[in-house]
Amino acid sequence: MSVTVITDSVATIPAELAADLRIVVVPERLTLGDETYVDGQLSLEEVVARIDEGFTTSGPSPGDFVEAIEQHGSDDGVLIVTVARELASSTFDAAHVAARMINQRVNVHDSRTAAGAQGLIVLGAARLARDGRPLEEVTSEAFYIGDRVRLVARLDDLNWLARGGHVPYLAARAGDMVGVKPIVEVRHGRVHTLRPALSLEGASERLLDIWRSSDPGDARLHIAGLHALGEETAAELLDAVRAVVTPASDFIGHFGTVMVMHSGPGLTGLAWWWDERQLLVTSNSLGRAQSQHPVDCLTD
């Protein structure tokens, strides 16, 4: 067996990718009016149409995580990667309670991010788990990626984030008055507003400029295009990236209903990290030193 990697549905990992890497996804919950649904049970279109009924969101319960561990856990250990505690403390706390309730080795990692950035952390850890690495290495990989991953997105407005208390209402109102398109970055568990753009096209170009400026050179790129009811735009952003560099891994992730309730339905963005880890291996032939070749420390 190998280490089991568990996350919550905020991570926006496509179902087929999660299945391929044996990632267990525990859904968040959305309450519309008097009815509660697990994340993904309703379409985004249906949720947006019913928004006037009033809504609340909540994380998985400790019992949800215990069930996931009992059904899919491994004797080699379990790593749970959660959405940032600052953004959804109930999810992180529930995972911690579950870890204390279960008679298995369970590490709980606060991703300090969300959406595709959280997904990239989970995927990196799951690849090591698939390769049979021990729990300590799988957990260290989550920390390593978490220190480097970035998430930048463009929004139609800031009103949804302001409603959830993630940005000041004054910033949302000012953006509405001026008519600009806001750009935000999730960093260290918090949502930060960046310099806005005058149009959606300009906002997309700003996202790409931020990504380009992060390139350290001679590193492997892991990237995700993100969207809420805007897959075509997310695909265009990824295509623009691929025109510059061939990613080591990429995917398009759509926001679930719970995330859309906080970001709004007009979001598109990018999450990425650069893997600069390399080993220099010198080969010798007939006693003569040959040129050194970079060899990846990790295989995907």
Image (spheres, rainbow, N blue to C red):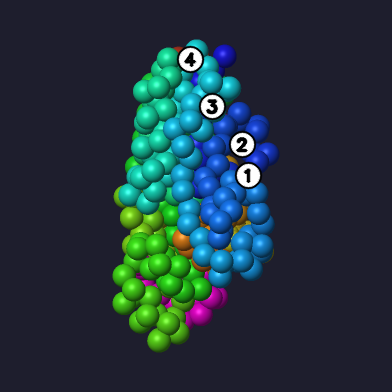
Picture residue at 46% right of the left edge, 48% below the top = 58
Marks 4 and 2, how far apart at CA: 19 Å
Q: Earlier in the sequence, mark 1 or mark 3?
A: 1
Q: Amino acid at mark 2?
A: Ala
Pinpoint residue 118: horizontal percent, then vertical percent. 46, 44
Secondary structure at badge 2 equals: helix
Q: Earlier in the sequence, mark 2 or mark 3?
A: 2
Return the disc, 4 or 3, that comes first in the chain's sequence.
3
Rendered-image quadrant of the N terminus: top right
The residue wearing badge 2 is: 18
Q: CA distance from mark 2 to mark 1?
A: 6 Å
Judged from the image, the secondary structure of the residue bearing numbered disc 1 is loop
Give the number of the disc on residue 67: 3
Instruction: Name the quarter where the C terminus is drawn.
Output: top right
Residue 241 percent location from the top left of the image: 56, 57
- Per the image, is 118 magenta? no
Disc 4 residue type? Asp
Q: Are marks 2 and 1 in contact (CB under 8 Å)?
A: yes
The residue under label 4 is 76
**In this picture, which residue range is highlighted in magenta?**
193-206
Pick the residue in front: 180 or 255: 255
Seen from the viewer's position, the closer of residues 171 and 236 is 171
**Distance Cα–Cα, label 4 vs label 3:** 17 Å
Residue that numbered label 1 is attached to: 14
> Hey, what amino acid is under mark 1?
Pro
Q: Kindly state the secondary structure of the residue where label 3 is placed.
A: helix
